[in-house]
Image (cartoon, grey):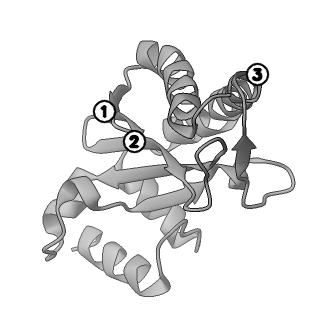
Amino acid sequence: MSTNQELKKIVLDTLYIFLKPKQFKKIGSSFLSTKAEMKYFINLQRSQSSTAGSLKFTINIEILSSSLFKLEDTSISEKDYRHFVRRIGFYIDPPHDKWWIIQNIDEANASAEEIIEIISNKVLPEFNKLKTTNDLAEMWRQNICPGITEKQRREYLSLIDK
């Protein structure tokens, strides 16, 4: 029987093998790719309901605009700040909050492969569409605001439009 830490390591290692050639570096349970002003994150979030032998987790998809962050008046560290946050389940049809529960190596490998397929077919193409702060702003102007409030959307647009 595998521990949840061993199962987590299998998932993370498999994701890293896929993401490293795509210029992502691994930082703990996250993967980061920096391109110009944009930082793209893929983060494994472990549930508190995981047990010693069972890992429950989801994947968060996040983007930070460094140039927008510099315009903001915030005491939050850049490493902890995001302008776009979606759970990976948003990319599944129909969209839902997807959590994997794995208890053995085969389930860890199968979940990692499923995640890689979603990242490859849905997440990375979206990252490619959101290459600049202006790309984020265009999305916000269409009232598409993943992971941010309406107030934040208006504040971000006012900073960008100055």
Q: Tell which tag, 1 or 2, sits nearer the viewer.
A: 2
Q: Point out which mark residue 106 bears.
A: 3
- Seen in the picture, residue 88 relative to 7 is either above or below; the reply is below
Q: Spatial distance from mark 1 to mark 3, Cα to Cα?
A: 34 Å
Q: Point out which mark residue 140 bears.
A: none
Closer-to-camera residue (57/126): 57
Q: Earlier in the sequence, mark 1 or mark 3?
A: 1
Q: Residue at x 21, y 62 (%)?
A: 69
Q: Tell which tag, 1 or 3, sits nearer the viewer.
A: 3
Residue that protrudes farthest toward the bottom in the picture: 151
Disc 1 and disc 2 in contact, CB within 8 angstroms: yes
Mark 2: secondary structure: strand
Crowding near pointer 3: few (<14 within 10 Å), some, many (20+)?
Answer: few
Query: Which residue is label 1 attached to?
Result: 35
Query: Which residue is label 2 attached to?
Result: 40
Q: Earlier in the sequence, mark 1 or mark 2?
A: 1
Residue 131 seen in this snapshot: no
In the drawing, does residue 159 fall left or right of residue 103?
A: left
Q: Amino acid at mark 1?
A: Lys
Closer-to-camera residue (45/22): 45
Q: Tell which tag, 3 or 2, sits nearer the viewer.
A: 3
